[in-house]
Amino acid sequence: MHTPMKPKLSMLDLVAVREGASVAQALALALRTAQHVEKLGFTRYWLAEHHNMPSIASSATAVLVGYIAGGTQRIRVGSGGIMLPNHAPLVVAEAFGTLAELYPNRIDLGLGRAPGTDAYTMRALRRNKVETEQDFPREVAELQELLADARPGQRLVANPGAGTHVPLWLLGSSLFSAQLAAERGLPYAFASHFAPQMMMQAIDIYRSTFRPSVHLDRPYLAIGVPLVAAPTDDEAQFLASSIYQRVLGILTGERKMLQAPTNGFVASLNERERAAISDFLAMAVIGGPETVRQSFANLQDLTGADEFILVCDVFEPDLRLRALDIAQQAWEL
């Protein structure tokens, strides 16, 4: 049985573009936020690959990883994740191998098997490639080989890449990647920040079937945690209306830029809409300092996670940084 211990804190940034702001401002805020959480002692800062979404500026994920790593000193920086079916493993190995040479011992490579976009854009990314269930495990193995030490006579060598041993993580919101991460002895991150329904089942499969490897001798689990923290519960709920608006847009297909918080937004919804948002954000931590502290403790009791990867998209940039301060202080208590 897994014994809960205090988890590490990290952050996943979707690089949301705010209503009335530009992509350049979103990118600048990502760097400012990374620098801020580095000072707070966070373990890692991840960027997520998405495409054809005007409200999210993280499509060129490897470029962003370099931007954030270049503007910080110690925090680990990586992908949460690269959607591997969209890319040739060699290209990924060369990109992250280059990053690893530029920023030694600071780069992570989280991998997902979803497209991270709509079907139309998926076809543009993959051209005529048709993905099968067997492709993702094979491509993960190919990527591991390309980042390992090159063998004598090896015909395909990633340069840069070979010998960098960039740590691989598998990401998922279902059971497939949990099983593969356990089989390969890799760290696993569950996407509970947007798809919490199968979290406990995936965690159980990952831990119960884990095979020790050269990478890990025991399972290592991270979970995504949406965060909105403020000095009071009431203010946090008000600020969270930005997130509620975004989630409703995702569920209805009406995606907009990240919206400013709105008084009375939840009250304006019907019961079905409120339930859908609640299901989507079942793992969210929203509240004042004591609520955040207790919510973290409850999540840790439930999951025994080794790491919480916070997703914090408070609309006002300064209040976003304040929310992360509150989270770090609550976590220390």
Image (cartoon, rainbow, N blue to C red):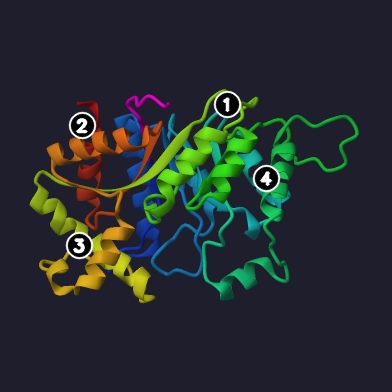
Please give left or right for residue 20 compared with residue 10 in the image. left
Q: Residue at x 30, y 56 (%)?
A: 281
- Tell me which amino acid carries mark 2: Gln
Point out the residue furthest to the right here.
Answer: 153
Of the residues under marks 1 and 4, which one precedes in the sequence? 4
Distance in Å between CA atoms under marks 2 and 1: 30 Å
Label 4 sits on residue = 140
Label 2 sits on residue = 329
Of the residues under marks 2 and 3, which one precedes in the sequence? 3
Which segment is the magenta one? 1-10
Of the residues under marks 3 and 4, which one precedes in the sequence? 4
Whether label 3 touches label 1, CB < 8 Å: no
- Tell me which amino acid carries mark 3: Ser
Label 3 sits on residue = 241
Whether label 2 touches label 1, CB < 8 Å: no
- Tell me which amino acid carries mark 4: Val
Q: Residue at x 19, y 26 (%)?
A: 333
Q: Residue at x 63, y 37 (%)?
A: 183
Q: Is residue 5 magenta?
A: yes
Whether label 2 touches label 3, CB < 8 Å: no
Image vertical order of residue 55 relative to residue 208, above or below:
below
Element marked by disc 2: helix
* Residue density around tag 4, few if under 14, some if 14–19, many if 20 or more, within 10 Å: many
